[in-house]
Image (tube, rainbow, N blue to C red):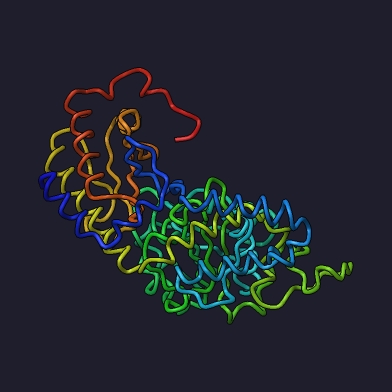
Amino acid sequence: MTRDEVAALDAADPLAGRRERFDLPDGVIYLDGNSLGALPRATPDHVGRVVREEWGRGLIRSWNSAGWIDLPQRVGDKIGRLVGAAEGQVVVADSTSVNLFKALAAATRMRPGRRVVLSERGNFPTDLYIVQGLADLADVALRMVEREEIPSAIGADTAVVMLTHVDYRTGAMHDMAAVTRAAHEAGALMLWDLAHSAGALPVDLDGCGADLAVGCGYKYLNGGPGAPAFLYVAARHQEAFRQPLTGWMGHAAPFAFGTAYEPAPGIRRALCGTPAVLALAALEAGVDELLAVDMAELRRKSLGLTRLLRDLVAEECAGFGLTPVGPEDPDRCGSQVSVAHPQGYAVMQALIARGVIGDFRAPDIMRFGFAPLYIRYADVWEAVRILKDILTTGAWDRPEFHRRAAVT
């Protein structure tokens, strides 16, 4: 494909105008939105208004007058629209790991007599760590199997199946409806981690019958570094949902200051501590950018971008030791492309030095994430041109590109 043909794709792109709503540095092709989303141009003004007017002028009155106290549910309902959840089932709070702990503890209590949390060996490590930590406190055991073994491994002792919808390394995507159905047929609950799905592709939690889900706010939702996470509890489970972090914001009457805990009705019982107002304001600005577009159109562009990268790498970079990772069919992948290379870390550092920012996952995977709101087809074409040049010239083989950074 020529540069002119790629330019024609951008000219016909119905989402092309959304790019201008993000503050992207000149000379940078940002293919790491699956680790940290780009800054929406609306975010500084929105957060600044919250700081200057609501905090600066309203002071403590803004918990009521500006609706701070309702932010976790208000932003949660907005995220719910992106992940197929009706109102009153999503709340924003804490981190993904903390919400996962809440959900797992509640899920295992809802399935008495069953003690196994089933997951796959390739799941994101922190999800597995959280189960291990819960096992130190309760009669819970983690069982890990290979991806293809999951349906047959769900047994009478399985309390909850915990999986990440889109694999963080390969981009491989589970069939959410089929796996959820298999869990339910065995009497288990289904918990999905949507870290690499929410804001990247259409998700239908309610339609698939999911029981619980978690996800982060700083990747495709563009909420900023360390943005709060979200927790989904299906309405049918909320009465039975008893999470262990029984803080005052999850209390039925937090300002009555009673000494005995009584869980709030509905999704609010999933809260714990005081909402992080400034962080929630930044996240809301990022979520609003996604709510302005059709998620099906977003997915169509995502598939176009990932197919283009796959095709160009195959055409232009053959013979340089690159190996595609993940399913060959883009429809079975999230919004990313992963390729392995024996010197993947150094090659990625050389790309970053040339302005193409992707990331690396051990032992040898280079990962390219596509946020369709601000990535162009021309960005893909140029990124592959630079990759080919680096591989052809051996420009990756410099000492500074082999030194491992603390965060990669």
Image coords of residue 216 (percent x, y): 52, 56
In this view, the residue in front, 73 or 369, is: 73
Q: Is residue 114 left or right of residue 186?
A: right
Residue at 26% of width from left, 56% of height from top?
327
Q: Is residue 95 above or below residue 25?
A: below
Image coords of residue 230 (percent x, y): 56, 62
Residue 158 visible at all: no
Quadrant in the picture for residue 294: bottom left
In this view, the residue in front, 73 or 212, is: 73
Q: Is residue 342 above or below residue 399?
A: below
In this view, the residue in front, 166 or 39, is: 39
Residue at 66% of width from left, 77% of height from top?
266
Residue at 37% of width from left, 66% of height from top?
293
Quadrant in the picture for residue 333: bottom left
In the rendered image, the quadrant that contains the C terminus is top left
Q: In this view, does 292 lie to the left or right of 78?
A: left
Q: In this view, does 170 lie above or below 319?
A: below
Image coords of residue 72 (percent x, y): 63, 64
Q: In this view, does 128 lie to the left or right of 391?
A: right
Quadrant in the picture for residue 275: bottom right
Residue 285 visible at all: yes
Residue at 56% of width from left, 51% of height from top?
227
Q: Outermost residue toward the bottom?
A: 236
Image coords of residue 231 (percent x, y): 57, 65
